[in-house]
Image (spheres, rainbow, N blue to C red):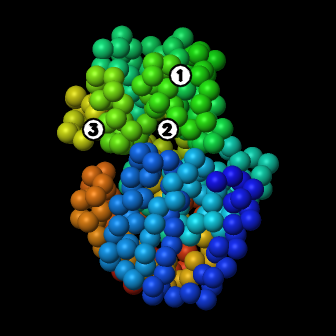
Amino acid sequence: MTIVRLATAGVVISWLTAASAAAQTVSISTTPSGSFTNSAGAAMAKVISEKTKIRAVIQAQALQGHVPVNAGAAEFGMSNSFDATFYVTGTGEYEGQGEHKNLRLIGSLIPYRVAMHVRADSDIRQLADLKGKRVSGGFNAQKTIRRIIEAHLANAGLSYKDVSEVLTPNVSRSAEDFTAGRTDVLFFAIGSAAVKQAAASVGGLRVLPIDASEDAVRRVQAVLPGSYVVEVKPAPALDGITEPTRLVAFDMVFFAHHKVPDDVAYAVTKALHENKEALTATFRPFGLFDPGKMAKPVLGMEFHPGAVKYYREVGLLPKS
């Protein structure tokens, strides 16, 4: 869907002001099929559809999730926390675009644990070894991905000037470039379907750990505000991790268009908060989801009133 179509698709949202939670269909905007966000969105849509009177469907596309939601072409969407802040406040990659005021926060969900992956037999052992190597760049349809890769390079004291940048529009296309041998490293959230597909295609993957020293982490956070370091242990679903490995992480946030009715936002918030087990059964990374932290604020973004009502009822926000 193009930006022009998104701009005109705002009429789709108009019926929401009069609709109730009963017998209603809503869409969840995600990144392309096979991505971490898309897989998470599918699990959420399943739980919402099964646990409420709302039918939720996935709207996978190359654009960032907040773009169609802000335009009114989707009711719900998700992105990482730092990109949501940049988008809402008109900073970072969105400098000069002005504030985007149509988004309302539903909640913080699971951490994105992200990594640079190489072929299992690659001589690239650490991020510093990427100097001179072919690395995906550009990402005109997903500029946040370029920023995350830039943060990994910064962790090793490198920048895009130190590598051979291979232009690509989005993260899914970059995975295709990697499996086709056009790049030397694959960026993706660990546990993604695309990572498992890449591992099967190239005979196995290996994750490059980050430098967790204070200065190196500070360089990452200068590019990705709010990011943090996690140690990930090997697990059957995590290709490329054979020993405890330190990675970069940041939160996934779920949001709605401001005209989504309060009762719909309330029902969706309640369904997600109460059904971690069902979410995890569909998408294992939801095992990292802490419902008690759903009301974690995101800089620059207001909570949806429907979410606020639920969080106050369960004690995650003050009742005042």
At 70% across and 74% down in the image, what residue appears? 11
User: Which one is earlier in the sequence, the residue at label 3 or at label 2?
Assistant: 2
Give above or below for 115 relative to 102. Answer: above
**For mark 3, does the 10 Å Cα neighbourhood hold few (<14), some (14 to 19), or many (20 or more) residues?**
some
Residue occupying image coordinates x 28% and y 33%: 239
Q: Amino acid at mark 3?
A: Leu
* Amino acid type assigned to the residue bearing label 1 in the image: Val
Q: Nearer the viewer, residue 315 or 294?
A: 294
Residue displayed at 55% across by 20% down = 158
Residue under label 1, please give it: 135
Residue 116 to residue 248: above or below: above
Query: What is the distance, in whole Å, between disc 3 and disc 1 at their CAs?
Result: 22 Å
Choose the circle earlier in sequence order: 2 or 1. Answer: 1
Residue 223 pos. (x, y %): 58, 37
Where is residue 87 shown, x and y percent of the image? 65, 54
| Number of the front mark, 3 or 2 | 2
Residue identified by numbered label 3: 238
The residue under label 2 is which amino acid type?
A: Ser
Q: Which residue is mark 2?
A: 172
Q: Secondary structure at mark 3?
A: loop
The CA span between labels 2 and 1 is: 14 Å
Q: Secondary structure at mark 2?
A: helix
Q: Is residue 230 above or below residue 119?
A: below
Instruction: Locate residue 163 relative to residue 197 in the image: left or right.
Output: right
